[in-house]
Amino acid sequence: MGPVAFLWPPDRAWGAAQDNTPPCGSQAGVTNRTEFPLTNGAVSLVIQDESYNVNLAIAYINDPTSNDEFETIVSSSNYPELDPGHECYSVPNPPSSVVSGSNATLQLKYVSDFDTDTNETYYACADITYVPLSEFTEDVLCFNVSTEDTEVTTSSVGASGTASSTSSSTAASATTTTTGTSSANSNASQKSRHNGGLSGGAIAGVVVGSVAGAALLALAAVYLWRYRQKKVQRDRVVALRMGDWTNPAKRTASQETPSEAH
């Protein structure tokens, strides 16, 4: 994968030699299409290197071949900079002319100095087919996590859910599962070009593992605190009882009380 890729819907096969070539940064054409809801849609991205001016666009045709065929749906002005991590974007509902069964292609366009010290423009595409939300059976869980922020929220899209996205490139949300994976490198030479980078699935695993680990630590801390509080209370009760037993005046008073009653 390049600096940024679609985690869901899955993107076209990535190619190191083509990732700067518009409009899709891939040698592959349309091969597989992912069902995408007509309403409440969202996309999930994985970012493995700092990127800038991230623009999400869509073309409501079968096989776009030019940037001119795409229209922006999430402007780069809203996301001028993204830190490594994950992002989830809401996708506006398509125009009324787009119906169930219509095809479209989502496009990512962004800037990064991933390959060199010079900023370059990168592209990635994901091909979709629209279906009614009532027939959309996949439960897509999006999460926004960056290396600069650890705030945790959740958003989802599916037959029983709605989609949401953060208003800041560093806002963080997390879930324990995601749907869709980044495409694999097309050959061994492409892998060697970025052998130091993690795949989309690997980064997803790191993020999910970090969130799960933090949750477990929090639960453990709460459990230890409650255990300590209960122990302190027990020790206090025992100390009071021992004080009563070792105090002769109190012990004598407790023994004389019954006889005085008679």
Image: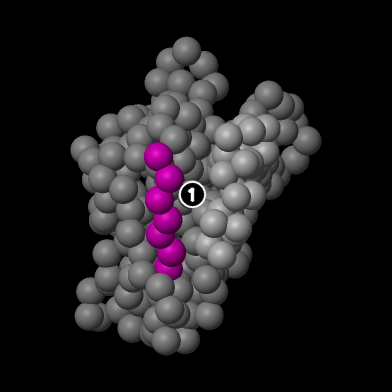
- Residue 106 falls within the magenta-colored stretch: no
The image quarter in which residue 252 lies: top right
Observer-nearest of 137 and 30: 137
Q: Tell me if residue 178 comes above or below residue 168 in the rendering.
A: below
Near mark 1 (Cα within 10 A), the count class, few <14, some 14-19 or many ≥20, is: many
- Image coordinates for residue 79, horizontal then vertical, percent: 29, 38
Which residue in the structure is indicated by mark 1?
174
The magenta region covers 151-157
Q: Residue 53 placed where, x, y %?
A: 31, 34
Q: Which colour scheme is used?
A: one colour
Q: Nearer the viewer, residue 185 or 208?
A: 208
Residue found at x 57% / y 39%: 250
Tell me where residue 175 appears, x and y as whole percent: 52, 54
Residue 69 seen? yes
Q: Which residue is drawn at 60% across and 50% down?
A: 256
On screen, residue 189 versus residue 96, left or right, reads: right
Name which quarter of the figure residue 155 lies in: bottom left
Q: Residue at x 28, y 32 (%)?
A: 80
Q: Residue at x 63, y 41 (%)?
A: 251
Q: What element carries label 1?
A: loop
The quadrant where residue 187 appears? top right
